[in-house]
Amino acid sequence: MREAKSADIFLLTLLGLIWGSSFFNIKIATYSYEPFTLALVRVIFASFPLLLLCKYKNIKIEAFSKEWRPYAIIGLCNITIPFTLIAIGTSKINSYLAAMLMSTTPMSGSILAHFFTKDEKITFLKSLGIIIGFSGIIFLFFDELIINKENYLFVLITILGSTFYSIGGILTLRLKRKGNENVTTSTTIWSVIFLLPLSLFFETPWNSNPTLESTLSLMYLGIVATGLAWLIRFRILVTNGLVFQTQVAYLIPIFGVMFGYLLMDEIITWRVLTSLVIIMVGIYIVKKNNKGLKK
């Protein structure tokens, strides 16, 4: 892996910008699309660049091979469930709050990795980072302008969605020898299979009358924030390694707060900014002491 150059830093910043912008677009998409349909259309749009990449590189997609079960489970845990839960949560909370809550993924991932992997045990410093990071989230619950009795359940739903990303990440480690392109494309295909009947049965999308704004946001989520972003992520992983790529966790909540304030006129309080700093410190400590990433 080479030392990061200006172009690499630009791509990492672009990835953080894209993923940070996904939350206000989710918010806009929820104005017209219900959660299952939103997640379904998003992964359908995302699947196109992935399928084209696999075809271009002549990569065999193993979604329906004899070993299809792991791909199906990861598609459920890493895409279907979190995409749906985040859509439900973001519909009732500020978009930047969703971005901040999603930044808990490295911390919840460290807790899960302690129990389900051999070389990712929680150390004193890592546990300190987890406690600090989650204390930043707890601090937000004292700001009634942001979290109150009307939306606290949706905050918990969003955190649960973040946790499922961590679960999916742990499961994906078991397929790391199967190739990133194949794993991502296969799990995306399975997520479409799961989401299609859920959308058709529970939400009857053919009766909806979506606005152009919501539709454009949904297309952006699928093509740019999921499909293109994954390709950028893969490029960074191949060129600079996992350690460099994970630094995007610092950028996502920062961009999420900026977009929420500037484009959605969402209220930013001093508690929000304080919480953001606390969360960043927690993430830094966790990542600094994450031995599994130092490869």
Image (cartoon, rainbow, N blue to C red):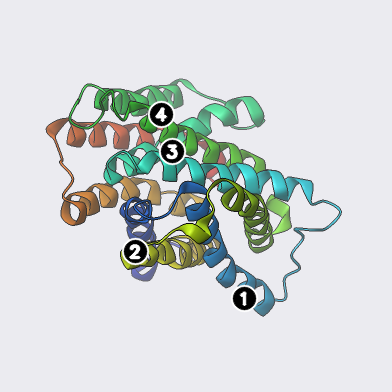
**Of marks 4 and 1, the one in the foreground:** 4
- On the image, the x and y values in percent for residue 92 come to 32, 39
Q: Is residue 199 above or below residue 163?
A: below
Look at the image and tell me whether residue 241 can be seen.
no
Q: Nearer the viewer, residue 134 or 290?
A: 134
- The residue indicated by pointer 2 is 211
Q: Is residue 163 above or below residue 18?
A: above
Sequence-first tag of 4 and 2: 4
- On the image, the x and y values in percent for residue 13 come to 33, 60
Please state which amino acid type lies under the numbered disc 3: Lys
Sequence-first tag of 3 and 2: 2
- Going 56% across and 72% down the picture, which residue do you hit? 49
* Mark 4 crowdedness (10 Å alpha carbons): few <14, some 14-19, many ≥20: some
Q: Nearer the viewer, residue 113 or 85?
A: 85
What element does badge 2 sit on? Answer: loop
Sequence-first tag of 1 and 3: 1
- On the image, the x and y values in percent for residue 78 come to 58, 45
Q: Nearer the viewer, residue 159 or 212?
A: 212
* Mark 1 crowdedness (10 Å alpha carbons): few <14, some 14-19, many ≥20: few
What is the distance, in whole Å, between disc 3 and disc 2 at their CAs?
Answer: 41 Å
- The residue indicated by pointer 1 is 52
Sequence-first tag of 2 and 1: 1
**Of marks 1 and 3, the one in the foreground:** 1
What element does badge 1 sit on? Answer: helix
What is the distance, in whole Å, between disc 4 and disc 1 at their CAs?
Answer: 37 Å
* Mark 3 crowdedness (10 Å alpha carbons): few <14, some 14-19, many ≥20: many
- The residue indicated by pointer 4 is 156
- Going 31% across and 53% down the picture, which residue do you hit? 24
- Going 86% across and 54% down the picture, which residue do you hit? 66
Sequence-first tag of 4 and 1: 1
Please state which amino acid type lies under the numbered disc 4: Leu
Mark 1–mark 3 CB contact (< 8 Å):
no
